[in-house]
Image (spheres, helix red, strand yellow):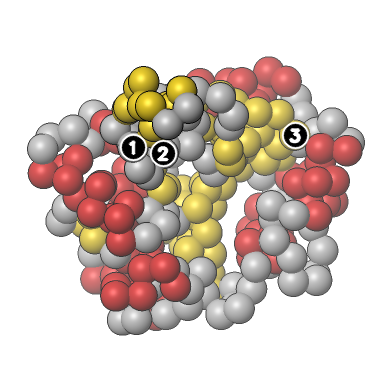
């Protein structure tokens, strides 16, 4: 089964790094975050990857030409300004014969069980499965009674509400919901899937962290430094 990693965005909130390299190549510890993501899947037996490239694509292509891994990586340039839904659409020829395939973003890490995700997807037999996660709070959460603080929690995790955590599974029928028009996967395609009752949620209550900005990058590096990188266990 193939796994698609969306690697084409500008990563503008990480401009200190992405001025020179694409976001998936920003290092967490000693390796680019992209390699951490590939290793998450590889740990569960996934060995066939397709990277949808865009911004500074040649840097990623060069990296995989120079370095050897125990898994197969195919790089496909899908345009510099292409949105996520159209990046996937441009991979149709590579994926149309796949009964199901994995897909995630090139900037998120998790300790979820990928095989459990796949089993859930195969069991419900819908077109798509999205991993949903609890969003981490970036600052300490303060609870008040009037102006008096009665509780303070430093960077807890929100216990109500879920967000898109990436780590999708799609059947090849997803291409019926995509078009040539430049569109975000998270807009019209997923909205159409919801209307057709073809989008299921896989709840993950464990570790999940995206690398959206410098603060996130520093958090992930600290987790490695203090041997608390749960996605590596």
- Is 15 situated above or below 23? below
Q: Residues within 10 Å of mark 3 (few under 14, many from 20)?
A: some
Q: Which residue is mark 3?
A: 199
Q: Which residue is mark 2?
A: 137
The picture places residue 233, in percent across and down from the top left corner, at: 23, 29
| In the image, farthest residue toward the right | 196
Confirm or deny contact between disc 1 and disc 2 (CB under 8 A): yes
- Is 175 situated above or below 201? below
The picture places residue 147, in percent across and down from the top left corner, at: 42, 31
Query: Can you see residue 114?
Result: no
Q: Residue at x 48, y 64 (%)?
A: 7
Name the side, left or right, on which 71 lies relative to 167. Answer: left
The picture places residue 185, in percent across and down from the top left corner, at: 69, 55
Name the side, left or right, on which 114 lies relative to 92. Answer: left
Q: Residue at x 30, y 48 (%)?
A: 36
185, 77: nearer the viewer: 185
Q: Which residue is mark 1?
A: 140
């Amino acid at each position: 089964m193939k796994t698609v990693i969306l690697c084409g965005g500008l990563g503008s909130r990480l401009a200190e790094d992405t001025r020179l390299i694409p976001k998936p190549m920003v290092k967490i510890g000693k390796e680019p975050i992209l390699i951490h993501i590939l290793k998450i899947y590889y740990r569960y037996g996934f060995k066939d990857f397709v990277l949808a490239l865009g911004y500074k694509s040649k840097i990623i292509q060069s990296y995989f030409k120079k370095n050897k891994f125990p898994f197969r990586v195919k790089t496909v340039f899908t345009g510099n300004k292409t949105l996520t839904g159209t990046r996937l659409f441009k991979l149709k020829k590579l994926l149309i014969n796949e009964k199901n395939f994995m897909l995630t973003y090139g900037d998120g890490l998790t300790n979820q069980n990928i095989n459990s995700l796949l089993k859930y997807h195969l069991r419900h037999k819908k077109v798509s499965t999205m991993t949903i996660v609890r969003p981490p709070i970036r600052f300490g959460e303060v609870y008040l009674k009037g102006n008096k603080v009665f509780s303070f929690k430093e960077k807890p995790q929100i216990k109500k509400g879920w967000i898109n955590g990436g780590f999708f599974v799609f059947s090849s029928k997803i291409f019926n919901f995509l078009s040539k028009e430049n569109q975000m996967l998270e807009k019209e395609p997923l909205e159409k899937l919801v209307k057709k009752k073809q989008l299921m949620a896989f709840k993950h209550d464990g570790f999940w962290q995206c690398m959206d900005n410098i603060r996130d990058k520093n958090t992930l590096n600290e987790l490695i430094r203090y041997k608390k990188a749960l996605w590596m266990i």
